[in-house]
Amino acid sequence: MVAGLALALCAAVCMGTATVFQALGSRRTARADTGATDRAGGARGRWGTVVAVLRGWPFLLGAGLDTAGFGAQVGALLLVPLFLVEAAVAASLAVTAVVGTFVLKLRLRRGEWTAVAVVCLGLATLAVSAGREGDGDGDAALRAAAPVAALVVVAVGWFVGGRLRRGRAVVLGAAAGFSFGLTATAVRLLPEVSVLALPAQPAAYAVVVSGLGGYLLLVQALQSGSVTAATAAMVICETVWPGVFGVLWLGDTTRHGYTGLAAAGFAACVAGGVALARFGEAGGDGAAGSGTGGGEPVEAGETGGA
Protein backbone atom coordinates (compact mmCIF):
# COMPACT_ATOMS: atom_id res chain seq x y z
CA MET A 1 0.00 0.00 0.00
CA VAL A 2 2.77 2.46 0.96
CA ALA A 3 4.76 1.70 -2.20
CA GLY A 4 1.69 2.10 -4.39
CA LEU A 5 0.82 5.44 -2.78
CA ALA A 6 4.41 6.65 -3.22
CA LEU A 7 4.32 5.71 -6.91
CA ALA A 8 0.96 7.48 -7.35
CA LEU A 9 2.38 10.66 -5.79
CA CYS A 10 5.48 10.38 -7.99
CA ALA A 11 3.21 10.14 -11.03
CA ALA A 12 1.34 13.26 -9.90
CA VAL A 13 4.57 15.25 -9.49
CA CYS A 14 5.95 14.20 -12.89
CA MET A 15 2.68 14.74 -14.78
CA GLY A 16 1.92 18.03 -13.07
CA THR A 17 5.35 19.42 -13.93
CA ALA A 18 5.04 18.08 -17.48
CA THR A 19 1.83 20.06 -18.02
CA VAL A 20 3.68 23.34 -17.50
CA PHE A 21 6.23 22.56 -20.19
CA GLN A 22 3.73 20.99 -22.61
CA ALA A 23 1.45 24.00 -22.53
CA LEU A 24 4.46 26.32 -22.79
CA GLY A 25 5.63 24.48 -25.92
CA SER A 26 2.15 24.52 -27.46
CA ARG A 27 1.68 28.24 -26.90
CA ARG A 28 5.15 29.09 -28.21
CA THR A 29 4.34 27.23 -31.40
CA ALA A 30 0.97 28.97 -31.66
CA ARG A 31 2.62 32.39 -31.36
CA ALA A 32 5.34 31.44 -33.86
CA ASP A 33 2.69 30.14 -36.26
CA THR A 34 0.72 33.37 -35.91
CA GLY A 35 3.85 35.40 -36.64
CA ALA A 36 4.67 33.28 -39.68
CA THR A 37 1.12 33.74 -40.95
CA ASP A 38 1.39 37.51 -40.56
CA ARG A 39 4.68 37.60 -42.45
CA ALA A 40 4.04 35.03 -45.16
CA GLY A 41 0.27 34.98 -45.40
CA GLY A 42 0.03 31.22 -44.80
CA ALA A 43 -0.26 28.85 -41.88
CA ARG A 44 0.78 25.30 -41.13
CA GLY A 45 -1.79 22.57 -41.42
CA ARG A 46 -2.99 20.61 -38.39
CA TRP A 47 -0.30 17.95 -38.74
CA GLY A 48 2.37 20.59 -39.30
CA THR A 49 1.37 22.33 -36.09
CA VAL A 50 1.42 19.08 -34.12
CA VAL A 51 4.88 18.18 -35.47
CA ALA A 52 6.19 21.66 -34.63
CA VAL A 53 4.97 21.33 -31.05
CA LEU A 54 6.43 17.85 -30.64
CA ARG A 55 9.84 19.03 -31.86
CA GLY A 56 10.11 21.90 -29.37
CA TRP A 57 12.25 21.37 -26.28
CA PRO A 58 9.53 22.36 -23.76
CA PHE A 59 7.16 19.72 -25.06
CA LEU A 60 9.94 17.13 -25.32
CA LEU A 61 10.87 17.77 -21.69
CA GLY A 62 7.22 17.54 -20.74
CA ALA A 63 6.90 14.30 -22.69
CA GLY A 64 9.89 12.85 -20.85
CA LEU A 65 8.38 13.76 -17.50
CA ASP A 66 5.05 12.35 -18.59
CA THR A 67 6.74 9.12 -19.59
CA ALA A 68 8.33 8.85 -16.16
CA GLY A 69 4.97 9.68 -14.62
CA PHE A 70 3.27 7.02 -16.70
CA GLY A 71 5.79 4.43 -15.54
CA ALA A 72 5.07 5.36 -11.92
CA GLN A 73 1.34 5.29 -12.65
CA VAL A 74 1.57 1.76 -14.08
CA GLY A 75 3.44 0.61 -11.00
CA ALA A 76 0.80 2.21 -8.76
CA LEU A 77 -2.05 0.62 -10.73
CA LEU A 78 -0.62 -2.80 -9.96
CA LEU A 79 -0.55 -2.11 -6.21
CA VAL A 80 -3.46 0.14 -5.18
CA PRO A 81 -7.08 0.74 -6.28
CA LEU A 82 -7.66 2.51 -9.57
CA PHE A 83 -9.65 5.33 -7.94
CA LEU A 84 -6.67 6.24 -5.74
CA VAL A 85 -4.29 6.40 -8.71
CA GLU A 86 -6.71 8.47 -10.79
CA ALA A 87 -7.27 10.86 -7.89
CA ALA A 88 -3.50 11.35 -7.77
CA VAL A 89 -3.59 12.15 -11.49
CA ALA A 90 -6.19 14.83 -10.79
CA ALA A 91 -3.95 16.12 -8.01
CA SER A 92 -1.23 16.73 -10.59
CA LEU A 93 -2.97 20.05 -11.33
CA ALA A 94 -1.98 21.18 -7.84
CA VAL A 95 1.61 20.36 -8.76
CA THR A 96 1.18 22.33 -11.99
CA ALA A 97 -0.01 25.36 -10.03
CA VAL A 98 2.85 25.27 -7.55
CA VAL A 99 5.54 24.58 -10.19
CA GLY A 100 4.06 27.37 -12.30
CA THR A 101 4.78 29.86 -9.54
CA PHE A 102 8.51 29.06 -9.86
CA VAL A 103 8.95 28.32 -13.55
CA LEU A 104 6.53 30.86 -14.99
CA LYS A 105 6.52 33.41 -12.16
CA LEU A 106 2.77 33.03 -11.69
CA ARG A 107 1.12 34.23 -8.52
CA LEU A 108 -1.26 31.93 -6.70
CA ARG A 109 -4.18 33.80 -5.20
CA ARG A 110 -5.95 32.78 -2.02
CA GLY A 111 -8.52 30.73 -3.93
CA GLU A 112 -5.82 28.74 -5.74
CA TRP A 113 -3.96 28.02 -2.51
CA THR A 114 -7.26 26.84 -1.06
CA ALA A 115 -7.72 24.49 -4.03
CA VAL A 116 -4.19 23.13 -3.54
CA ALA A 117 -5.00 22.49 0.12
CA VAL A 118 -8.28 20.77 -0.84
CA VAL A 119 -6.42 18.45 -3.24
CA CYS A 120 -3.83 17.57 -0.60
CA LEU A 121 -6.55 16.92 1.96
CA GLY A 122 -8.42 14.74 -0.56
CA LEU A 123 -5.32 12.68 -1.24
CA ALA A 124 -4.62 12.26 2.46
CA THR A 125 -8.22 11.14 2.98
CA LEU A 126 -7.95 8.59 0.18
CA ALA A 127 -4.65 7.30 1.53
CA VAL A 128 -6.34 6.59 4.86
CA SER A 129 -9.57 5.13 3.45
CA ALA A 130 -8.46 3.17 0.37
CA GLY A 131 -8.61 -0.60 0.66
CA ARG A 132 -7.10 -3.29 -1.47
CA GLU A 133 -6.74 -3.41 -5.21
CA GLY A 134 -9.35 -5.67 -6.82
CA ASP A 135 -8.36 -9.09 -8.09
CA GLY A 136 -10.42 -8.76 -11.28
CA ASP A 137 -8.86 -8.08 -14.66
CA GLY A 138 -12.01 -8.30 -16.77
CA ASP A 139 -13.11 -11.09 -19.06
CA ALA A 140 -11.86 -11.91 -22.55
CA ALA A 141 -14.62 -9.87 -24.23
CA LEU A 142 -13.80 -6.77 -22.19
CA ARG A 143 -10.09 -7.07 -22.92
CA ALA A 144 -10.79 -7.52 -26.64
CA ALA A 145 -13.06 -4.45 -26.64
CA ALA A 146 -10.39 -2.23 -25.07
CA PRO A 147 -8.31 -1.54 -28.23
CA VAL A 148 -11.47 -1.01 -30.27
CA ALA A 149 -12.71 1.54 -27.73
CA ALA A 150 -9.31 3.26 -27.78
CA LEU A 151 -9.40 3.60 -31.57
CA VAL A 152 -12.98 4.89 -31.53
CA VAL A 153 -12.30 7.54 -28.87
CA VAL A 154 -9.19 8.86 -30.65
CA ALA A 155 -10.81 8.82 -34.11
CA VAL A 156 -14.05 10.47 -32.98
CA GLY A 157 -12.21 13.07 -30.90
CA TRP A 158 -9.89 13.94 -33.79
CA PHE A 159 -12.71 14.03 -36.36
CA VAL A 160 -15.21 16.02 -34.31
CA GLY A 161 -12.61 18.35 -32.79
CA GLY A 162 -11.29 19.21 -36.25
CA ARG A 163 -14.72 20.38 -37.43
CA LEU A 164 -15.85 22.47 -34.50
CA ARG A 165 -15.41 26.21 -34.27
CA ARG A 166 -16.90 26.68 -30.80
CA GLY A 167 -16.11 24.42 -27.88
CA ARG A 168 -13.29 22.73 -29.74
CA ALA A 169 -10.86 22.87 -26.81
CA VAL A 170 -13.41 21.31 -24.46
CA VAL A 171 -14.25 18.46 -26.86
CA LEU A 172 -10.59 17.70 -27.58
CA GLY A 173 -9.71 17.95 -23.90
CA ALA A 174 -12.53 15.57 -22.99
CA ALA A 175 -11.44 13.13 -25.71
CA ALA A 176 -7.86 13.28 -24.43
CA GLY A 177 -9.16 12.60 -20.93
CA PHE A 178 -11.18 9.58 -22.06
CA SER A 179 -8.08 8.30 -23.86
CA PHE A 180 -5.86 8.67 -20.81
CA GLY A 181 -8.55 7.05 -18.67
CA LEU A 182 -8.62 4.13 -21.09
CA THR A 183 -4.86 3.86 -20.77
CA ALA A 184 -5.08 3.41 -17.00
CA THR A 185 -8.02 1.02 -17.28
CA ALA A 186 -6.29 -1.07 -19.95
CA VAL A 187 -3.27 -1.50 -17.66
CA ARG A 188 -5.57 -3.04 -15.06
CA LEU A 189 -7.09 -5.33 -17.72
CA LEU A 190 -3.72 -6.93 -18.43
CA PRO A 191 -3.75 -10.45 -16.98
CA GLU A 192 0.05 -10.58 -17.20
CA VAL A 193 2.57 -7.75 -17.20
CA SER A 194 5.66 -9.30 -18.74
CA VAL A 195 7.60 -8.55 -21.90
CA LEU A 196 6.93 -11.95 -23.44
CA ALA A 197 3.22 -12.00 -22.63
CA LEU A 198 2.32 -8.44 -23.67
CA PRO A 199 2.22 -8.95 -27.49
CA ALA A 200 -0.57 -11.50 -27.07
CA GLN A 201 -2.69 -9.20 -24.88
CA PRO A 202 -5.31 -6.98 -26.63
CA ALA A 203 -5.29 -4.60 -23.67
CA ALA A 204 -1.60 -3.87 -24.32
CA TYR A 205 -2.50 -2.39 -27.71
CA ALA A 206 -5.22 -0.33 -26.04
CA VAL A 207 -2.55 1.16 -23.76
CA VAL A 208 -0.43 2.19 -26.75
CA VAL A 209 -3.30 3.54 -28.90
CA SER A 210 -5.03 5.46 -26.12
CA GLY A 211 -1.76 6.80 -24.71
CA LEU A 212 -0.36 8.11 -28.00
CA GLY A 213 -3.79 9.17 -29.25
CA GLY A 214 -4.38 11.06 -26.03
CA TYR A 215 -1.13 12.97 -26.57
CA LEU A 216 -2.20 14.04 -30.06
CA LEU A 217 -5.61 15.12 -28.79
CA LEU A 218 -4.01 17.00 -25.91
CA VAL A 219 -1.70 18.92 -28.24
CA GLN A 220 -4.66 20.01 -30.34
CA ALA A 221 -6.71 20.88 -27.25
CA LEU A 222 -3.95 23.14 -25.90
CA GLN A 223 -3.71 24.82 -29.32
CA SER A 224 -7.42 25.22 -29.92
CA GLY A 225 -8.73 27.61 -27.30
CA SER A 226 -8.98 27.99 -23.55
CA VAL A 227 -6.45 25.74 -21.89
CA THR A 228 -8.44 26.13 -18.68
CA ALA A 229 -11.53 24.58 -20.28
CA ALA A 230 -9.53 21.87 -22.06
CA THR A 231 -7.63 20.88 -18.92
CA ALA A 232 -10.76 20.84 -16.74
CA ALA A 233 -12.53 18.59 -19.25
CA MET A 234 -9.50 16.33 -19.43
CA VAL A 235 -9.22 16.01 -15.63
CA ILE A 236 -12.89 15.07 -15.23
CA CYS A 237 -12.95 12.59 -18.11
CA GLU A 238 -9.70 10.81 -17.22
CA THR A 239 -10.50 10.54 -13.52
CA VAL A 240 -14.16 9.89 -12.74
CA TRP A 241 -15.16 6.98 -14.96
CA PRO A 242 -12.00 4.86 -14.44
CA GLY A 243 -12.45 5.14 -10.67
CA VAL A 244 -16.06 3.99 -10.92
CA PHE A 245 -15.06 1.25 -13.37
CA GLY A 246 -12.46 -0.08 -10.95
CA VAL A 247 -15.00 -0.35 -8.14
CA LEU A 248 -17.85 -1.86 -10.18
CA TRP A 249 -15.97 -4.19 -12.54
CA LEU A 250 -12.53 -4.84 -11.10
CA GLY A 251 -13.33 -5.23 -7.42
CA ASP A 252 -11.46 -2.25 -5.96
CA THR A 253 -12.53 -1.55 -2.39
CA THR A 254 -12.18 0.89 0.47
CA ARG A 255 -11.44 0.00 4.07
CA HIS A 256 -14.49 -1.30 5.91
CA GLY A 257 -16.70 1.60 6.95
CA TYR A 258 -14.65 4.19 5.02
CA THR A 259 -16.60 4.27 1.75
CA GLY A 260 -18.13 7.69 2.38
CA LEU A 261 -14.78 9.14 3.41
CA ALA A 262 -13.12 7.73 0.29
CA ALA A 263 -15.84 9.19 -1.93
CA ALA A 264 -15.40 12.60 -0.28
CA GLY A 265 -11.63 12.45 -0.75
CA PHE A 266 -11.98 11.46 -4.40
CA ALA A 267 -14.47 14.30 -5.01
CA ALA A 268 -12.12 16.76 -3.30
CA CYS A 269 -9.23 15.75 -5.57
CA VAL A 270 -11.32 16.10 -8.72
CA ALA A 271 -12.94 19.39 -7.65
CA GLY A 272 -9.59 20.86 -6.63
CA GLY A 273 -8.01 19.74 -9.89
CA VAL A 274 -10.78 21.35 -11.93
CA ALA A 275 -10.49 24.56 -9.91
CA LEU A 276 -6.76 24.63 -10.70
CA ALA A 277 -7.19 23.91 -14.41
CA ARG A 278 -6.46 27.57 -15.18
CA PHE A 279 -2.79 26.85 -14.49
CA GLY A 280 -2.69 24.84 -17.69
CA GLU A 281 -2.41 28.34 -19.18
CA ALA A 282 1.35 27.91 -19.15
CA GLY A 283 1.90 29.63 -22.45
CA GLY A 284 -0.41 32.60 -22.16
CA ASP A 285 1.02 35.89 -23.31
CA GLY A 286 2.65 37.62 -20.46
CA ALA A 287 2.41 34.63 -18.22
CA ALA A 288 6.07 34.49 -17.57
CA GLY A 289 7.56 37.50 -16.01
CA SER A 290 5.88 40.36 -17.85
CA GLY A 291 4.74 41.80 -14.57
CA THR A 292 1.30 42.57 -15.95
CA GLY A 293 -1.57 41.77 -13.66
CA GLY A 294 0.61 40.80 -10.75
CA GLY A 295 2.19 37.91 -12.60
CA GLU A 296 -1.09 35.96 -12.94
CA PRO A 297 -1.71 33.92 -16.05
CA VAL A 298 -3.55 35.46 -18.95
CA GLU A 299 -6.38 33.59 -20.59
CA ALA A 300 -5.19 32.85 -24.11
CA GLY A 301 -8.33 31.28 -25.43
CA GLU A 302 -8.28 32.89 -28.86
CA THR A 303 -4.92 31.72 -30.10
CA GLY A 304 -6.46 28.99 -32.17
CA GLY A 305 -4.65 26.07 -33.69
CA ALA A 306 -4.18 25.48 -37.35
Image (spheres, rainbow, N blue to C red):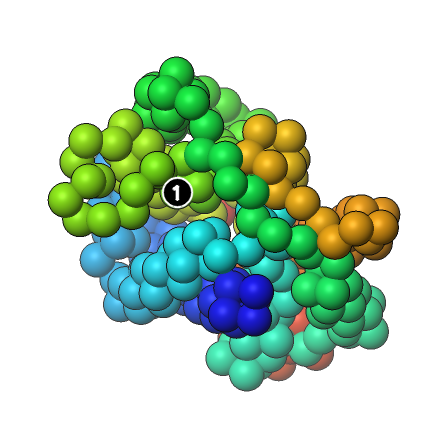
User: In this image, 295 relative to 15: left or right?
Assistant: right
User: In this image, 214 relative to 255: left or right?
Assistant: left
* Residue 269 vertical position relative to residue 230 in the rendered view, above or below: below
Q: Which corner quadrant holds the N terminus? A: bottom right
Q: Amino acid at mark 1?
A: Val
The residue at 19%/40% (across/down) is: 197
Observer able to see residue 172: no
Residue 103: x %, y % from top left: 49, 79
Q: Which corner quadrant holds the C terminus? A: top left
Residue assigned mark 1: 187
Number of numbered discs overlaid on the protein picture: 1
Q: Nearer the viewer, residue 190 or 228?
A: 190
Residue 11: x %, y % from top left: 47, 64
The residue at 47%/52% (across/down) is: 77
User: In this image, 117 relative to 64: left or right?
Assistant: right
* Residue 102 vertical position relative to residue 54 in the rendered view, above or below: below
Mark 1 residue crowding within 10 angstroms, few (<14) / some (14–19) / many (20+) = many
User: In this image, 291 relative to 104: left or right?
Assistant: right
Residue 285: x %, y % from top left: 52, 64
Observer able to see residue 257: yes
The residue at 49%/57% (across/down) is: 79
Q: SS at mark 1?
A: helix
The residue at 79%/51% (across/down) is: 256
